[in-house]
Image (tube, rainbow, N blue to C red):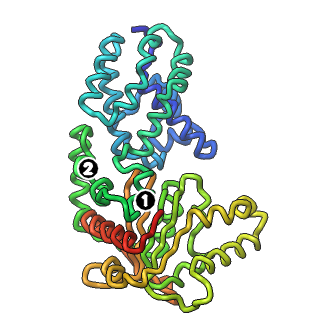
Amino acid sequence: MSQKSRNPLAQALGTVLQGLRDKMGGISSTEIADKLGLAASHYRMIEAGSAIIQPSRAVKIVQTFDTIEFIPLCQVLVAIQILDSNRQHISDMRTTAELICEANPALVRVLKKMEKLWAIIENAEPSDVAKTIVSQGLKDELEKFLTTEPVIFTADEIDNFMSPTYERPLAGPLYSKIGNILQGVAPFYLDTVLQLIGNLRDVTPRVTAEELARWEVLHKERFTHVIGIIRTPEIILDVSTFDYSYLWDDHFHKMLIVYRNPPTERERTIKERITDNLRRRFELEHIKYESELSRFDEIVGNKLAIEHGKDNTSLIDDILSYREGNMNNLWAYIMINGYVIPFIDNATVGLNTSDIYGSSLGYDETSEKLVKIRRLYNDLGFKL
């Protein structure tokens, strides 16, 4: 194999990192290198594909590039190392890629995109290989794998799972991957992650209103749906504190809210009141919200759904119960990668911020709540 030839998967990873760096507002390669604890020249070689990243850097990478997922990154870094050990001959590297696909099917879509690279790697200039990596879709497929881990539960299924005609059990597809989530990870990391999970298993997170708000801001670009089960509808009327901005994000599909208690004002629906409040807020700052106002009726009409669960109060109470107590709100954030992140809290109108607290549910609790939420939506005939 030619000395100028590079590991194609390492080169593809370099193009992905460079693209993600560009999306971070023009942060320099030197700044990234500093965050990773690398020399600037070495990191530039990584982006060029002429050097590989050691798996020991995985944690720092996910901390630096916050859209990269830890598990798929470990799989890619291990695959790069295995391919690199067979760089002497193209045929050996190609055979190794096929063996990796058999051992770890999650990487099949990524590694299959290298098919047209094998014929040119040995003699082509690295720049030409880089162009082929982009043109053949390897860069996009690898970025998708690293940032939105392959899922069983698709966006279309999420859009339909709560309609009355949907037959597929909810908890199964969302969480069937939990049992084998570490499959394909090198044993060294497997042991580390299992130890971390063991340490966290008996810790119940206590989340304040400020912490939840910070979490929303940090992850809002990764939401596809927000599901809310709330006791009193007035909690969502204050558009200055309740965030509706992600309705206008292209990747966001829908916000779905069911409330238990009848509203204090009966002349208008809760959605009409929210719509009026939100429109008024945008019009007061019409220059800032010009884009949102241009599509206001379309977005609010299609992406915001609110229903009164008046005949389902017992089921709502069951959903809002938490460890022998009662809470007022449950929010479930469905992420791009298919995960569901649930929060349950005691927030209500007039309660001081310092008195608001909540928690994020465990796996078993989440599964139970999601089944009940689906039953509630089916009872309401609430189609998405």
Q: Mark 1 points at which residue?
A: 334
Residue 286 position (above or below residue 318): above
Q: For the residue marked with disc 2, what is the amino acid?
A: Val
Q: Is residue 185 visible?
A: yes
Which quadrant, please, contains the N terminus? top left
Q: Which of 357 and 171 is in front in this view?
A: 171
User: Is residue 205 visible to us here?
Assistant: no
Give the amino acid type for the residue marked by disc 1 in the picture: Ile
**Label 1 near label 2: C-beta < 8 Å?**
no
- Residue 171: which quarter of the image? bottom left
Residue extending farthest bottom? 264
Please, which residue is most extreme toward the right here?
287
* Position of residue 315 measured from the top left corner of the image (x, y, whole percent): 32, 79
Report crowding for label 1: few under 14, some 14 to 19, many 20 or more residues within 10 A (C-alpha): many
On screen, residue 223 above or below 240: above
> Residue at label 2?
193
Residue at the image position 46 percent from the left and 40 percent from the top? 144
Neighbour class for label 2 at 10 Å: few (<14), some, many (≥20)?
Answer: some
Q: In this view, does 380 lie above or below 249?
A: below
Quarter occupied by residue 54: top left
Q: Which residue is drawn at 63% across and 46% down?
A: 25
Q: Which of 212 and 258 is in front in this view?
A: 258
Residue 150, given in percent of the width and then of the height, sits at: 37, 43
**318 lies left or right of 348:** left
- Secondary structure of residue under mark 1: strand
Q: How far apart are marks 2 and 1 (CA)?
A: 23 Å
Residue 342 placed where, x, y %?
A: 38, 67
